Amino acid sequence: MNSKITLAISKGRILEDTVSLLERMGMAPVEDLNKTRKLLIDTEDPNVRVVVIRATDVPTYVQYGAADLGIAGKDTLMETQGEGIYELLDLGICKCKLMVAGRSELPDPGKRLKVATKYVRSAQQYFAQQGKQIEIIRLYGSMELAPLTGLADLIVDLVDTGNTLRANGLQPLEHIEDISSRLVANKASLKVRVGTLQNIVEQFRNAIEES
Ligand code: PRT
Ligand code: MG
């Protein structure tokens, strides 16, 4: 077993904020993540290395213990069953909202609404709580197109500034959840390597309190 702690971090939109947090903690990756092709990288902290993977893969690495810790959006975490994963901290980065959006006000409730989303689990749960019967249409991107082309009545997607919705003639309709990135841990690692992990979590806590 590698004695270093492995921290899974996401490529894409979360990366910049994650790296500035790690820099403040003295845990910056030793290579420039925008340039290197390496995916497993040492950090300034000799006890910690990072794996840089797709946002949606972070919970999987942590769940199976391939990474001891991970940083992932709450949206991504809500879509995974989360067994074997423990959410430790709200890092307060990459904030946005998970929302229902559509062309205007909610369409005719008499009809079974079609909802396009990649957040299938969260959408199902939300509409079930509302007692609404819906049909989910799973998409992997550009959800905003669905109501414009008649593929769906509504979408469930992340909203930050609202610019993407506006540019496509859509409106935010209902708020489902506030989203930010979270520090998660593998449950078994937390037991086996409790001392080391507690230290790292404390470093994260201090870094987010400073900011
Ligand atoms: O692309 P891949 O499958 O690898 O993964 P991913 O698409 O999940 O990764 P990425 O990098 O696109 O996003 C990673 C994480 O960033 C998400 O899981 C969220 O936790 C977080 N995040 C924060 C966002 C946004 N804000 C956001 N605004 N992710 C996506 N958006 C998109 C949204 O889907 C919509 O298309 O931005 C658009 C809306 O933005 P506004 O500002 O126009 O409202
Ligand atoms: Mg993406």
Image (tube, grey):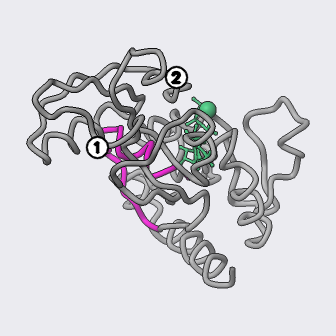
Specify the quadrant of the image occupied by residue 207.
bottom right
Residue denoted by label 2:
145
Asked whether 77 falls inside the magenta stretch, the response is yes
The location of residue 148, given as percent across then percent down, is: 48, 22
- For this rendering, which residue is in front, 203 or 90? 90
| Callout 1–callout 2 Cβ contact below 8 Å | no
**Which SS class for mark 1?**
loop
Specify the quadrant of the image occupied by residue 78.
top left
Ligand 2 - quadrant of the structure image: top right
The image shows residue 73, relative to residue 55, as above or below, that is below
- For this rendering, which residue is in front, 149 or 185? 149
Judged left or right of residue 189, residue 71 is right
Please rate how many residues cluster around mark 1, counting C-alpha atoms within 10 Å: few if below 14, some from 14 to 19, many from 20: few
- Is the N terminus in the top left, top right, bottom left or bottom right quadrant? top right
Q: Residue at x 76, y 53 (%)?
A: 16
Residue denoted by label 1:
83
- For this rendering, which residue is in front, 202 or 151? 151
Q: Residue at x 80, y 53 (%)?
A: 29
Q: Nearer the viewer, mark 1 or mark 2?
A: 2
Asked whether 32 falls inside the magenta stretch, the response is no
The image shows residue 130, relative to residue 123, as above or below, that is below
Q: What segment carries the magenta color?
A: 71-89
Say which amino acid is labelled 1: Glu
Say which amino acid is labelled 2: Leu
